[in-house]
Image: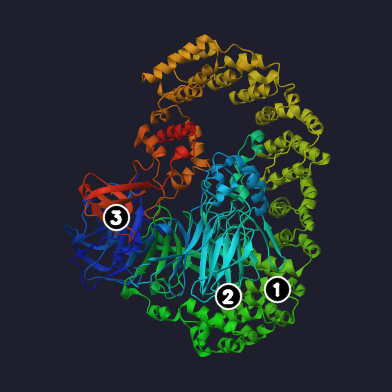
Amino acid sequence: MNRPTLLALCLIAFIGDLTAAAKIGSIKSSSEQSGNEAAQAFDSSTSTRWSAQGRGAWIQCEFDTEVEVKEVGIGFQAAERNYAFELHSSLDGKKWEKTERLQSKSRSGVVNYTIAPRKARLLRVTVFGSDENDWANVHTIHVPGITAGPTSGRDPGTKPEFVVTEWASDPSIANTVAISLDDEGRAYVTAARRRKQSSLDIRNHQDLVKKDLSLSTVEERRSWYREYLTGKNWIPDRNGDGTRDWQDLTVQKDSVIRVTDKDGDGKGETIRTLDEYHTEVTGIAAGVLAVGSDVFVAAEPDFLRYQDADGDGFPELREVVATGFQVHMGQGGHNLSGVTLGPDGRVYWSLGDKGHYVETAEGKVYHQPNSGGIFRCELDGSRVERYSSGERNAQELAFDLHGNLFSMDNDGDYPGEKERALYITEGSEHGWRLNWQWLRKQDFTRISGIPAYNPWMDEKLFLPDRADHAAYLTPTIGNFGPGPCGFTANPGTALSPDLSDCFFMTNQQGQVRVFRFTEKGAAFEFKEQAAIKGGRSNTGLAVGPDGALYSACYGGGKGSIFRFDVTEEHQHPARKETREILPRPPEKATSETLRAWLSHPDQRVRMKGQFELARRGMGSLLKDVLNDPEASRLARLHAIWGLGQISRRAPGTLALLARAWSSSDPEVIAQCAKVAGDIPGDSEEAEAVRNHLLEALSHQSPRVQFFAAISLGNHKVREAAPALIELASTQGSRDPYLRHAAMMGLKGALTPEQLAELHSHESRTVRLASIVALRNLQSPTVASFLEDEDELVLLEAARAIHDDQSIPEALPPLSQLLDRPGLTNEALMRRVINAAFRVGSYPALLRIESYLKRNEGSSKLKRTALASLLWWSQPPVLDAVEGRYRKHSARDKNPANEALARLKPIIMADNELREVLLNGVSVRGEASWLEGTSEHFNKLAPALQMKALEGMAKINSPDLRKFVEAALSSTDSKVREKARDYAAKAGVPMLDLLMGILEKEGTAGKGKAIKQLAEDKDPRAKRKFASLIEQFRQGQAAPEWKLELWQAARANGIELPETPDLLEYGGDAQRGRAIVSNHAAAQCIRCHKIGKEGGKPSAEITIGPELTGIGKLRDRKHLVASLLTPSSEITDGFGTVVLKTTEGEEVSGILTKKTELFWTITLANGRKRNLRPDEISSHILASTMPPMGAILKPEEVRDIVEFLASQK
């Protein structure tokens, strides 16, 4: 199905002959798309619009006086479509007069519609969609002689037009991920050539998931690669040494490249390589930042700094600042990235969820093998710290003007999940764990028979805060979609004034999305603005010294950098001055010049002045700026941050903040509190600011309280504990970020024993904050909270004890909650049951048995408890709750078997528990578990009969033949098919069975029967198989079992043509749905929407075509072709094209529409171009979807085809 492609066309709409004095008083609509509100149809700008989905969507304006309407002109966006609409008018809003149904007839420009004159106070345009979709898109309604009122939107003409150009293009910068421009305007980009090739992607090696999850350091992965990869045929012999091993992973090279516009023509043409990265454990080069003459690079496992040691203008001296990033193979794209400069004078970078083991120069170890994080260091590369953790793939970071750090984090690819906007603070934990990506790989579910528990989804950890949200994480400030790539902030003077406070984001599409963040309590909320069209597969983003926005482009083999800018009349007035200042060497500037820079409207200029003043140690000057009543707020904040920089190397500096603590500006006090937390808590200087921090804790501003609480925790101020407890009690329940700050404060202020004493505090929030503090301290005293009556408190304690690296000493007390009747919270009880399983003692086993005997809890919990007993003697390596790798020793099976014998009456009386038991027999092969169950076989449901057959075959039960023969007479075809699978093993003659199936009409079971027939050595079987082969060659084979026949022939050395129709019929729609929804490598549902599930198509954002109803729009042949060769026929708007015209011109962009008359191409600048087929000499089409034949098995492709064909 086609995606609405909404591009600005120069249209003007009029409503004629209205009273000149009239004004538009208000504007309403039935609905509106975020960023394309109703008011934008009346702002006189052709680059904005009102958009709404649904036939019958309407937009309405009210005049402040009665007017006469005779003629209406309406301009539609995407005017090549034919929109149907009606005009409605009313004097009182109750009785409406409407026109006949009108058609836009795909006309662009000024389109006037004459109607019978009528009096009106309200005018409504009702749109019934177009001939392509059900979206309404109206960009301008202009009322001659009537002015827009205050509620009607923007002033006319204020919306800037964007100009998008290709600033650089060269094969050497193909697949660029990150981009940074230095103060001279030179672009540094990372070129990723190793991704999913030499940098292995676990989605392509899912048999290695458990091994990969077992790793805890990069060096373990290196050793494993060197041992395991030897002789693996799937590795290309890239170095040509005749062997395939780990050394073949060292040939392909990622690089960082500098691109310079040396001739000044506005295009980057001079290419120079900074460095290359290509060890066997190198991921991809995904982050770069130019700071002065230095360049920082993120290329896991290393974070590097390059200096221009010889002064030739090129940074060549290489230093590894930190290493140990990317413990796991993990998913491609989850890398070390997001290098950005903080106004505090530190460099920040982001790590995806592949884990880290980082040891700093000071001997500090940061180890979270399954978690991402945000790290930082000083500008000289010293003092590496982990700032935050739990990000999944926060690919790029950005600071606002007040030093607040944000990122847009990718989601976990689960149906119903969305991406997260993150406000990242010191010590914030954002909750994601790598092991949650592979929950379906748990062996535990093979016996429990229910889907793997998913903490991320089942506990709704990806959503914003709510009453029962997990307390250990700082929740997202809002959800959005689809997945982000580049992310940066306007430093103040880039682009135009109306965008000076905006953030920009890419998501590998031909656009840049725009956001604004606003304060809400101690945190923020955000709202999306209208997107900027242009570019191609945009990834990294950076603002250049010229004030334009630059985007890297990934994919296509031809590298590009796009430049986004507004027309000159809309540019920020300070851009020219900014461009002149940035290249100046700050060390040559006078102190007065540097002071003046602190007040500049551009953050980069302010930081340039601040950093140099801090480097010179000019604390007194910074103090003067801070205390100057005429100084701007931003100048004062930069003075504080500059003093913070000095204080980190020169104790005593923060005494210069003395007057600022009493400022009338809360943000000044908040930043004083923030920098105070960076100094050592045992210093004299810390003593001096302690009272100020205690006073700030009771300030009315939540931001002041937030930073004061964290700094008091850093200083370990014990006398702050009562106030911190009060903060948690009064404010923490309403604001999760204040709860986090209180937790950080309490973690430092109190000992673990003192924190444990708060288990009886009357405030739930105080108890939750204390639990999280003890979790961070890894203290067993957290077990004191297991006596609580509040299940949410118990759950938080259980998370602290059970999850991540756990608190082993507290697991036995957690397991003892099984003795407490009446607990029903699933998230809690799963951890309690699993704690008993992990403890593994005889008393723990008896607790699980007792829990099952009480017959309480949901069926899921009872299944889980029974599965724990069935797995008891051989614990799976992937945890039953988290999917984390946990290796247990084998245990004696007899105690568990005895418990199961005692539970047998309960099990056999419960259909679900019987299924679990039969699963256990099938998986574990324990014969004793089937004792006393055979008499129940004929009473079992078909699904359980099949489980029983599997179990009997597994243990070579002497009763197998009896039950196979009984099952062969079943009325259920699937039971009969399962019985045939085990007939030979049971000694039941097979050939006659198979021949009978193949002779019967219908196709049920024939595919499998053909494969079994091909393995039979009986002459009759060989003759029958030969006749089937001949049917295939004559084109007479039934399409439903052609695939099995072709596969059986190939297995027997018989060549048959491999044609796409093998996959058209015979699939299983139910299995196909599961693949579409859950397959890790295919990830269909991430890009496509089917019904209410999957991708997020809208008028602005769609990655893949919607598949709802696809079965009645496309035949099976088309579906197979779309899966195997997606570039052969691309749905309009979802593929890229590079073509040459007959005049030799190269044109590239999105193929928006293709007809016999015209090809419509959306160019990188967002404009459309129409070309006749006879004007095109050659072209290359590429789909954004990978060929599924390289990812899925043929049977899986066939199942998807069956599922899609059923969508009618």
Q: Residue furthest front?
A: 241
Q: Few, some or many C-alpha atoms within 10 Å of disc 1 (few <14, some 14-19, many ≥20)?
A: many
Quarter where residue 204 is shown: top right
Residue at 55% across, 13% down: 1017
Q: In the drawing, does residue 873 fall left or right of residue 697?
A: right
Q: In the drawing, does residue 1095 fall left or right of residue 217?
A: left
Q: How many labels, in total?
A: 3
Q: Quadrant of the C terminus?
A: top left
Q: Nearer the viewer, residue 174 or 799?
A: 174
Residue 353 at what x, y percent from top left? 59, 54
Give the foreground label among 2 and 1: 2
Disc 1 marks a residue whose amino acid type is Leu
Q: Which residue is mark 1?
A: 712
* Residue 1147, numbered circle: 3
Q: Is residue 736 visible?
A: yes
Disc 2 marks a residue whose amino acid type is Gly
